[in-house]
Image (spheres, rainbow, N blue to C red):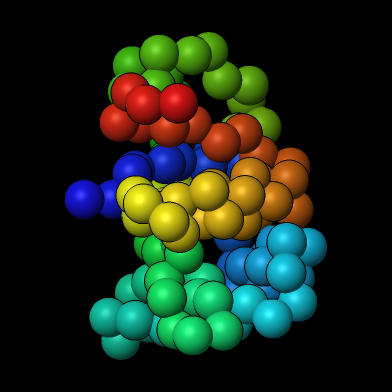
Amino acid sequence: MSRELVIVSPRAIDLADHLMAAVRIDPHLGLRTIWSGGGTQVCSADGTALMTVLRTKGFDVPDDVERLLGVTLTPAQVFWTELYVPRGAAAELGELVARALAGVVEGELFVRDGSA
């Protein structure tokens, strides 16, 4: 089972952002699109998926996001991106890439499944 994370950011996340985050952690990481472009995976050199990123969605009502995440958002944070990282051996590296991605887009990373 994977861990669900969310990045709330002031702009949409794109493929170039995924690449910048991956390179910050390890220049040997790669990207692949999945679900006919509905998602992107950051992968290790052997093809292991370290992080799966779904499309970024804008939102109009921050109250819903605040209710889901339990935090107060700034007016500039209007984009929601779901990410999934594996558990087990690849988890630590996947979460490092997720944190790097949040940094690239000047967003905040939230873990949704209650584990740290």
Q: Say whether residue 73 is left or right of residue 48.
A: right
- Which residue is depicted at the point 50% across and 76% down? 43
Query: Farthest residue in the left direction?
Result: 1
Q: Using the rendered view, name the quadrant where residue 21 is placed.
A: bottom right
User: In the image shown, does 108 or 50 lie closer to the viewer?
Assistant: 50
Residue 58 vs 107, above or below: the answer is below
User: In the image shown, does 106 or 4 lie closer to the viewer?
Assistant: 4
The number of numbered badges drawn on the structure is: 0
Q: x%, y% of residue 49?
A: 41, 71
Q: Is residue 40 visible?
A: no
- What quarter of the picture does the C terminus occupy? top left
Residue 2 vs 63, above or below: the answer is below
User: In the image shown, does 56 or 27 lie closer to the viewer?
Assistant: 27
Q: x%, y% of residue 56?
A: 46, 56
Residue 23 vs 6, above or below: the answer is below
- Which residue is depicted at the point 57% across and 55% down? 93
